[in-house]
Structure formats: C-alpha cells, structure tokens
Image: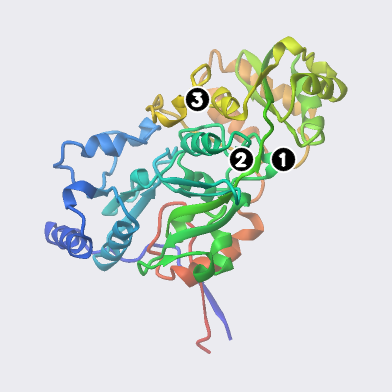
Amino acid sequence: MLIALFILSTIPLPFCTSTIFNQFVNCISNTTSANLSQILLTPNDTSYSTILQSSIQNLRFDTPTTPKPLAIITPLSYSHVQSTVICTVQFGLNIRTRSGGHDYEGLSYTSLHNIPFIILDLNQLRSISVDSKANTAWVESGATLGELSYWVSKKNNLFGFPAGECTSVGVGGQISGGGFGMMARKYGLSADNVIDARVVDVNGRILDRDSMGEDLFWAIRGGGGASFGVVVSWKINLVYVPPIVTVFSLSKTIEGGTQLINKWQHIAHNVTHDLFINLVITPVQLTFNSLFLGTADDLVKTVGDEFPELGLEKKDCIEMSWIESVVYHSVNLRGESIEALVERRPMPKAYFKVKSDYVKKVIPEEALEEILKWDLDLGTNCNAWGTSYGQGMRWGRRYFKGNFKRLAMVKGVVDPTNFFWNEQSIPPLVLSSSY
C-alpha cells in the first residue's frame, strides 16, 4: 500500500548561534580551496550591502526590518557551489539561490519567516560558450539575458535565443521559470530550447541530464530550479533569425480602444508565427509592440490583411538586426547601442506589487470596457489597479495546474527533506510502501 505525504513545512532548523555560524564558515573553508574573502561576505564586510542590494528591484524587500542573510556566497566555480550546499545542509541553514538578475517577490534574497539563511549568488558564474557548428551554447545561470543574446549574436548574427524582453533578468531564473519572450510564437519558451543542464543536488553532486534523469530535467525547465537544487549551467539550442527583422511600437488613445483590443485578441495568436504583437495598457494610452522576423514591406502587408484597424504604415516600422531588436524591446535600453546589453547597469528600483494571469478565452467587450475604466481611474486613484483590477480578473487554477503533482513527486525523490525551500517552492510528495 502506498502512502502519500505532503511535507509542507521546512526541515527543523537549529537556533543559529555564532558558534554554529562559525562552524559553517569553517566547513566552507575546509571543503574549498578558495580564499574565503573572495567568495564569502558577512554583514561586517563593506561590500555586503552592495552585493545584497545589487539585484533587489522591489524596495518593499529592502527595508531596515527586512530579514538579511547571515552570509552571501558568490561562487567562482562549481566546487564552491557544492561546498555551500554541503555545509548549509550539515549545519541546518536555509539557502536562497539567485542567478544575478532580479526577483520581484524577494524569494531569492530574504526570508518572510525570519529563518536563518544564506544567499548563494551566482552572479559570477556567467560564462557563455557558443558552438556555431552545432548551433548550441552552454550558458551559466549567472549570465543575464542581455549577455546571452549579445555573445550569441557576436558569434553568428543569424543565431538568436528566445528569451524575455527584460535583458537584466538572470538566465537561471528565466529558463527555470519557463521563459516567455517575443519569439515564443516561432520557437516556444526558453525552456523548450534546453537540451542539457548541470545541477548541484542536495548531496552536493553535479548532475547532468543523463545522471539526473528525465523527470528532474523536465521539472527544472518551468517548475523553478531553486526547488530542486542549484542549476549552475544550461545547454541550449540556438535558433535561426533572419538578417533583417522589423519592429514597431504604435500608440493609440485609450478612449474607444475596446474595439482595437478585441480585434487584437482574435488575431494575435492566429497570424504567421513570424509575427508577435503584444499590448500594453496604461492610464492614458494603448501601445502595440511588435517583432516581425522579416522585412517592413512584408510586415505592413501582413498586418494590413489581418489587423487593418491598427492603421499600421511603413513609416511606423523600423528594420534592424535581431540583436538590435533585443535592445529596442529591452525594458530600459531602447535607443542604446548593443554594447549596453553587457554593461549590467542597475535598473531603477521602486515599491510595487505585480500580479499576472493567463486567459484561455477572449475577454468580452463588456469586461474590456470595465478594465479601461479602471485604467482611466488610475490617474486619480492609484489604489484602483491593485484592488479593482486584481479582483476583477478571472483567476484560473493554480499556476502549475495538472503538473503540480508530478513536480511534487520529483521533489519527493530528489529532495525529500525539503532542504531547497522558499515560500513558493514545490513541496515534496513522498511515496512510501510502509504497509
């Protein structure tokens, strides 16, 4: 008889005295050849706050009362990651892994439950090795999407990778979360283009696709890598991009925008896969942004045939290389040179809350009218968006839907004690044959 148990809480943690922490530091020292000053920072180090804040975008999680890590480990090699995992397990500390990009909910750099924890910051594990003959690349999790796109294009400007528009996001977070971007209609998610990976498991072993097995390899490509181990690198397939692509950003007034949004809903997923059009709604306007894997003439014809209401003209379109389009659509880099992709500039920080949802059916025009009213109201009442809009959207089933049980079962096999835990991680579903 099989008994299934969900372990919903974390493993018991000892009270973290200075003695335990000193033992942890000694463990790191004894299991790695690195100079500790190169990879370990404590609150007594002058660069501790700088490194901690380097990828915090949401100021809600950067206050004097926000729980801070006992230490930050910035590994320079995979052996440093292995030592960190082994020692945190041995001394009962919680580990938070971040890949050098940014995390809106703070799960990778704080603890909402005041549990003693350390941060494993993969920022320095950022190498990118492109094999132009095989159309593949190995990329470490600490690289940013901008760096990945830049170095792939430098190797061959007919290569690209389907990734998100926010070029400062870390590769580890993007791929392990799925990875949606402007070439998704043509080439799928970032995770769909992964063919191998290297993961440090709870026992400190480095596993590749063969040794980890297909279940774990499936789980880390969309289920969140930090729930199952530390993914240090990914082998990806590169995709073909034409010498010329075309972009546009076309704004319309929000008044009377219901018909435009409604038409966009009906055609955006049915046109050629070479065309991606997204829509941004603000309190004052609608903005349609597009990437077309082809020329401006072909784009104008395609949009004219499928979406004439948009009124797109050739003067609205800009032809460029694919790597230039990455800069064009980047959240903070439009107008910059492609070299800006590798500069790792700090992004603007703010206090905010983000909500997201997926819909499978067209939103009725009546509901669109209501949404636009909320937007207009936002100009005088900033609370309207967080309350009215959040309550008005149709929330479907949980994010992982039917995959949740399988993810929990994988977790139960590879991390049954729930060592790799955070407030939104996958809990282990442990199966036992006790009877």
Mark 2, other Cα within 10 Å: few <14 / some 14–19 / many ≥20 = many
Q: Which mark is residue 186?
A: 1
Q: Which circle's residue, 2 or 1, is located before the other in the chain?
A: 2
Question: Circle 2 — which element?
Answer: loop
Three-letter amino acid code at disc 3?
Answer: Ile
Q: State the image quarter where residue 266 is shown.
A: top right
Three-letter amino acid code at disc 1?
Answer: Lys
CB atoms at circles 2 and 1 under 8 Å apart? yes
Q: Which mark is residue 162?
A: 2
At x 71%, y 39%, the residue is 185
Between 29 and 266, the residue placed more toward the observer is 29
Distance from label 2 to label 1 (Cα)?
9 Å
Mark 1, other Cα within 10 Å: few <14 / some 14–19 / many ≥20 = some
Between 284 and 143, the residue placed more toward the observer is 143
Q: Which circle's residue, 1 or 3, is located before the other in the chain?
A: 1
In the rendered image, residue 72, in percent from the top left (x then y), is placed at 26, 47
Q: State the image quarter where residue 400 is shown.
A: bottom right
Three-letter amino acid code at disc 2?
Answer: Pro
Question: Circle 3 — which element?
Answer: helix
Residue 109 visible in the current orientation: no
Q: Which mark is residue 338?
A: 3
